[in-house]
Image (tube, rainbow, N blue to C red):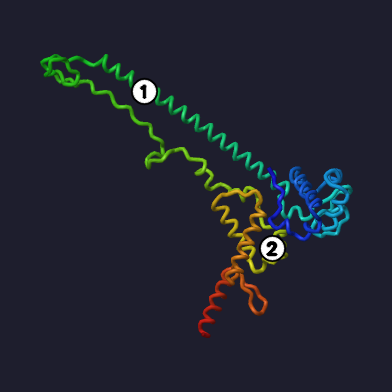
Amino acid sequence: MAWFALDDGFDSHPKVRKAGNAAVGLFVRLGVHATKHLTEGHLDGDIVTAYGTAATIRKLIAVGMLHEPGHGCPRCPQPAADGFYIHDYLDYNKSRAQIEAAREAARKRQQRGRDTARANRNSRDSAANLSSNSRQNDASFAANCDENAPLFEDSVAGQGDASRRDTHEGATGVPSPPLPSQNYDVADVDGGSTGSSTAERDAFGPTPIDIDGWTLTDGLRRWAHRDGYAPLVDLDYETAQFLDHFRGNGQHRPNWNTEWQKWIRRAHKWATERGRTSNVIALPNGQTLTGTDARVAGWLALASGDDNQ
């Protein structure tokens, strides 16, 4: 299932307020249609006119949320002659190739799960059959021993009844039948089992964020600069932290772009409230330092301040 992305600032965006509720409702329906049919933001004219009125369509075009043929937006492709295009669709939504790749990866995961369950059932059935056969063989062996064992005279046995254990004229009595040996797994030496769980098999496999093919796009960078989060927040550093976090916990999110925007907002809030930046420092000459250079510069500044007191 694919999702049409709207971030948590959509309701208060200037374009949305200017378009009005009726036109925004049309925009949401058109976005869901494009996502469902994997059109990557392109819309047939018949769909647009069937979903909305002439007035709501004109409002969306006027505020720049919807483009008609011949539009002047440099970031968006031109639609077909009788079609329309949703502004910045691929900046916030997955492409057709990404969605199809995610669906194929999910199909393979499900197939692996079914194959594993089938193999486990077959393994349990084989073990049960082996145990049953072993018990039958042990019983047959014991019966044969009883039938073929020699009987010894009372005077030799030293008991009132015949014995099959003591020696008679140098001959040795038939030994007791051996106990059935336990069937051990190859890896049972340390108490483990040769079978591995699904979690163990997938521990080194791709995580949901990698399977979904999420990457930091130019559109997200423009969003961060436009809304004032950069350069106070080091986008590359925070993106690396973002990826490490979700690769480590293996969690899935319906919309990775929205999750990344929340991450950047939190990083900006953290930096603002503490009077420090997220691995970024601006020098008086206008140069911006990031990463280790920024931390070293910050330590030198603190040391210089202590010396002047």
- The residue under label 1 is which amino acid type? Arg
Q: Quadrant of residue 221?
A: bottom right
Q: Residue furthest bottom?
A: 308
Precedes in sequence: disc 2 or disc 1: 1
- Residues 308 and 292: in front is 308
Q: Residues within 10 Å of mark 1 (few under 14, many from 20)?
A: few
- Residues 225 and 147: in front is 225
Residue 214 appears at what percent x and percent y? 65, 52
User: How far is disc 2 from disc 1 in space, using C-alphas?
Assistant: 71 Å
Q: Secondary structure at mark 2?
A: helix
Q: Which residue is mark 2?
A: 224
Q: How many marks?
A: 2
Q: Which residue is mark 1?
A: 135
Q: Is residue 62 left or right of residue 159?
A: right
Q: Quadrant of residue 257?
A: bottom right
- Residues 285 and 6: in front is 6
Residue 190 appears at what percent x and percent y? 37, 42
- The residue under label 2 is which amino acid type? Ala
Q: Residue furthest front?
A: 21
Locate the N terminus by quadrant.
top right
User: At 77% from the left edge and 55% from the top edge, which residue is drawn?
Assistant: 88
Q: Is residue 199 above or below residue 293?
A: above
Q: Secondary structure at mark 1?
A: helix
Q: Is residue 80 above or below residue 231?
A: above
Disc 2 or disc 1, which is closer to the eye? 2
Residue 217 appears at what percent x and percent y? 70, 57
Q: Are marks 2 and 1 in contact (CB under 8 Å)?
A: no
Q: Is residue 109 left or right of residue 179?
A: right
